[in-house]
């Protein structure tokens, strides 16, 4: 007790230490240095990263479900092989991201439990159904397109493991975006019915894709701090605007009509203006009341239960391997 008392610094000295550490940390961020797992970081920085990276990982994992729905029904063997590879890529992204989150001192089991119990968020976009083959094109074109717009700046995120994971993820997402656009282009150059399918998919996926960027800047509670820490490099509205600006000409190239009567080029701003997003729909989806929220969680829980034997086998193998090593 007595020696412990000697070890403890007086409160004021502790606070001064903390303030100095925070100052040095912010100076490293401002100098664009990467923060690595063993470096000192404020508890709130760690918490924000665990929140964002794990939500991102969950999104990749749940994001396999809408497209997985079409693997058995892809129109050709070539399309099936491409879609299989894409869905596998998303699984890989989830795994890199869980690993990046683990470097912050949280276990993958804990994160997966949070997803399966419904406690953790994942991207709103994956709570919408894939009703036709054209939806697979729309997901690649719009959803991967939005994901890239949001994730390219994350390659420069201040936290090293997250930034490095994003480099490969973005390269793969870029291939995904092109394959989606190519599906849309094929449909748009096809029959009247195929063009109708493509237009219908755009009508249903456009607004949810805009919601992927998160609440508008005035309502985004984390943005200011995340930008000061250079976790985020652009605000939600800035990225949404960039996405709209690059996507509208692509829709024109496809000969499709955007489902927004207020969408028009604003010469003064040098950007497209668009209609108001239905934020009520966004909040409903976040609360678990989107068209497929329940179905998605059920599917993940079933997959987890069905995979129990694989986890048990992996643990048994690791134990056997370790005991062999100890004996040697
Ligand atoms: N859905 O204060 P902010 C993909 C939550 S990956 C659900 O603005 P922040 C690949 C937010 O978490 C897609 N929740 O928060 C793929 C926060 O909740 P909390 C995922 C959302 O973090 C393609 C609250 O609202 N990408 O698509 C959403 O500063 C095709 C307040 O919001 C990432 O995760 C939403 N849309 O900014 C896979 C990228 N938006 O935690 C398969 C990394 C916001 O306080 C097929 N994440 N919320 O309870 C980010 O860049 C950021 O976390 C944002 C949100 C921009 C998503």
Image (spheres, rainbow, N blue to C red):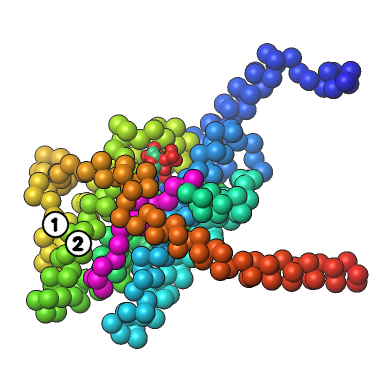
Q: Residues within 10 Å of mark 1 (few under 14, many from 20)?
A: some
Residue 122 higher or lower than 254, as above or below: above
Residue 239's disc number: none
Question: Label 2 to label 1, Cα distance in Å?
Answer: 7 Å
Q: Main secondary structure of the magenta part?
A: loop
Residue 63 higher or lower than 124, as above or below: below
Image-quadrant location for residue 305: bottom right
Q: Quadrant of the C terminus?
A: bottom right
In percent of width and height, residue 254 lies at 15, 68
Please say whether residue 285 is visible from this viewpoint.
yes
| Residue at the (59%, 33%) spot, across then down | 43
Q: Between 123 and 267, which is closer to the camera in this rendering?
A: 123
Q: How crowded is mark 2: few (under 14 residues within 10 Å), some or many (20 or more)?
A: many
Whether the residue under disc 1 has CB within 8 Å of ligand 1: no
Image-quadrant location for residue 323: bottom right
Q: Between 71 and 21, which is closer to the camera in this rendering?
A: 71
Q: Between 173 and 300, which is closer to the camera in this rendering?
A: 300
| Residue at the (39%, 33%) spot, across then down | 221
Residue marked by disc 2: 202
In percent of width and height, residue 42 lies at 58, 32
Q: How many marks?
A: 2
Tag 1 or tag 2, which sits nearer the N-term? 2
Residue marked by disc 1: 258
Please say whether residue 238 is visible from this viewpoint.
no
In percent of width and height, residue 241 lies at 24, 46
Residue 247 counted in the magenta span: no
Q: Between 192 and 271, which is closer to the camera in this rendering?
A: 192
Residue bounds of the magenta highlight = 119-134
Does 145 sit left or right of 304 as displayed?
left
């Amino acid at each position: 007790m007595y020696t412990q008392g000697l070890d403890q610094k007086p409160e004021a000295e502790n606070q001064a230490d903390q303030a100095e550490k925070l100052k040095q940390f912010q100076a490293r961020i401002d100098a664009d240095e990467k923060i690595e797992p063993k470096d000192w970081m404020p508890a709130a920085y760690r918490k924000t990263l665990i929140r964002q990276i794990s939500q991102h990982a969950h999104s990749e994992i749940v994001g396999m479900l809408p497209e997985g729905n079409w693997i058995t029904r892809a129109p050709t063997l070539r399309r099936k092989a491409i879609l299989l590879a894409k869905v596998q890529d998303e699984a890989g992204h989830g795994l890199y991201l869980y690993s990046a989150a683990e470097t912050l001192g949280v276990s993958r089991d804990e994160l997966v439990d949070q997803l399966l119990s419904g406690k953790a968020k994942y991207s709103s976009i994956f709570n919408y159904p894939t009703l036709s083959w054209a939806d697979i094109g729309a997901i690649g074109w719009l959803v991967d397109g939005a994901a890239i717009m949001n994730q390219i700046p994350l390659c420069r995120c201040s936290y090293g493991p997250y930034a490095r994971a994003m480099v490969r993820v973005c390269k793969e997402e870029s291939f995904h975006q092109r394959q989606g656009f190519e599906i849309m282009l094929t449909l748009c150059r096809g029959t009247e019915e195929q063009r109708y399918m493509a237009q219908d998919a755009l009508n249903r996926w456009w607004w949810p894709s805009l919601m992927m960027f998160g609440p508008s800047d005035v309502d985004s509670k984390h943005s200011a701090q995340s930008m000061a820490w250079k976790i985020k490099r652009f605000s939600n509205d800035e990225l949404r605007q960039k996405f709209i600006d690059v996507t509208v000409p692509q829709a024109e190239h496809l000969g499709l009509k955007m489902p927004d009567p207020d969408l028009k080029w604003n010469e003064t701003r040098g950007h497209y203006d668009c209609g108001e997003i239905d934020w009520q729909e966004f909040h409903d989806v976040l609360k678990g009341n989107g068209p497929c929220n329940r179905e998605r969680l059920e599917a993940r829980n079933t997959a987890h239960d069905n995979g129990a034997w694989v986890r048990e086998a992996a643990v048994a193998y690791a134990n056997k391997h370790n005991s062999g090593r100890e004996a040697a």
